[in-house]
Image: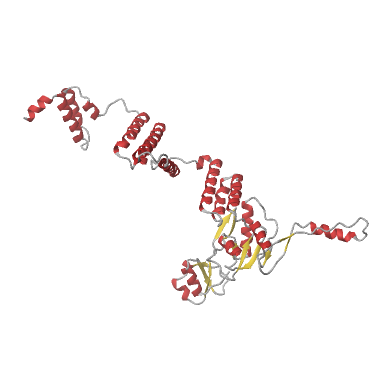
Amino acid sequence: MNILNGNEAFAAMMAGRNILCRAVGELIEFDDLDRFPATIFATPGYEFCIKVETMELAGITFAKPLTLDDVAEDQEIFMVYPDHISQIKYSKHCGEYFAGVRNGFAQADQQNAELQLQAIGELFGRVICYPPTIDNTGKTKKRRSRKIEEPAANDQNSTSNDVEEKTFESQSYIQSIEQGQITAVEESLIEEFIETNPVKLVEKFTAQISQFTNTQDVLSFRHVFLANGHLDQKDQQHLCKLTEDKLLALDPEQYTPKLEPSSGELSVDELKRLQEEAEKFIQSQKYESLEQPVQADEDAVYKELLADLLDRVAKSISPMEANAQIKYTKSWTPEQRAPLISAINKRLVELNPPKAQLSLAVRIQRAEDLTELDGLEIDVSACDEEIQPRLMELVNKRRLELDPFNIALEGS
């Protein structure tokens, strides 16, 4: 833990870091700044430190890995490798160190580095059952064991050589510390530990996703490939799609796209899918035939989309789903939209059949004589005042249709 003075702590706070404070020389723990007055940075007798932010991976909590903004030239940090941890002095001119910090494999202390390594092993179902090796260079290489010639059967002094040979060959590999310039051999060995080929990374992550058996592991695995600096956005989107498919396979009830009943609209995923299908169809139509006029292409696109929407309306299982199809015709003219509206109204009637009793407006329009119309006019007076003017217009219109001659005389 680095102890800061008031000026250093204030500068760190202005840079966006979380600062803790306590009285100098006391054994109490550091506490948040909101427990102290605003003038604490200019008050003597206090010391500060930067609050360490933590994260949890596979049930193990450790400090968040260092970022490029957290490290300075020649700062001692701990690099996390698959088989060991290296204590090194950071140099921005070293590509390996730069990539390690950028990709999230650097810690400020040994304890959190070991916890991060254990968490990575736990995430992939591995147990780090040996103490990680700490070195001061970060450079490791494998030394292949030399095969010692078997002594002749009649060699009387072969006993000690046999023991040494068996002991030497029983070791899987020997790590050695090597100072100085990185050789080509060392670079090839580093690539064995840190994969940089995007194609191999996608294959590796795809295999790992397919092996998961619960949704929590799938959700936790997302940040692994999203934090990998060797994958581009297209590869990350592909892996995200694989995790979504895996979540759907493990828990269909929770991760199946559903309609949103509260808003009356389709789910976001469904809307995106429909939009992508429409865009792909329009794009394919542009290059279908260069000899056809532009208007013909537009008509073909309109007819194809209309047919698709009419099919969706016919298969809708609720009024909400049927009405939702009108949202995809915002750029259409009223004439183009008319067939779809007619189909929606028809489907709504099928889903909600009308009651046997006709509405007052329909009965007015179907009145057979003036006597029946007069009786309906009395019913209009008992209706709500807001709809009475509209109903009276229907009454007068039907009266004119039934006895146009008398109406003409009254007007004269």
- Check the image and report above or below for 55 versus 211: below
* Total numbered labels placed on residues in the image: 0
- Check the image and report above or below for 289 versus 137: above
- Left of 151 or right of it: where is 311? left
The N terminus: image quadrant = bottom right
Q: Work out which residue is located at the far front of the displayed protein and give it.
A: 291
Q: Where is residue 133 drawn, in percent x and y?
A: 69, 62
Q: Residue drawn at (23%, 30%), measured in percent from left and top?
A: 361
- Left of 253 or right of it: where is 145? right
In front of the other: 260 or 168: 168
Q: Where is residue 187 drawn, in percent x and y?
A: 65, 61
Is residue 323 something that shows in the picture?
no
Q: Work out which residue is located at the far left of the displayed protein and give it.
A: 412
In front of the other: 369 or 181: 181
Q: Where is residue 115 drawn, in percent x and y?
A: 62, 59
Corner quadrant of residue 263: top left
Corner quadrant of residue 366: top left
- Colouring scheme, one of rainbow, by chain, secondary structure, one colour: secondary structure
- Left of 167 or right of it: where is 132? left
Q: Residue drawn at (47%, 66%), measured in percent from left and top?
A: 16
Corner quadrant of residue 399: top left
- Check the image and report above or below for 328 versus 41: above
Is residue 345 something that shows in the picture?
yes
Q: Where is residue 129 drawn, in percent x and y?
A: 70, 56
Q: Work out which residue is located at the far bottom of the displayed protein and give it.
A: 44
The C terminus: image quadrant = top left
- Left of 108 or right of it: where is 43? left
Q: Residue drawn at (53%, 54%), measured in percent from left and top?
A: 232
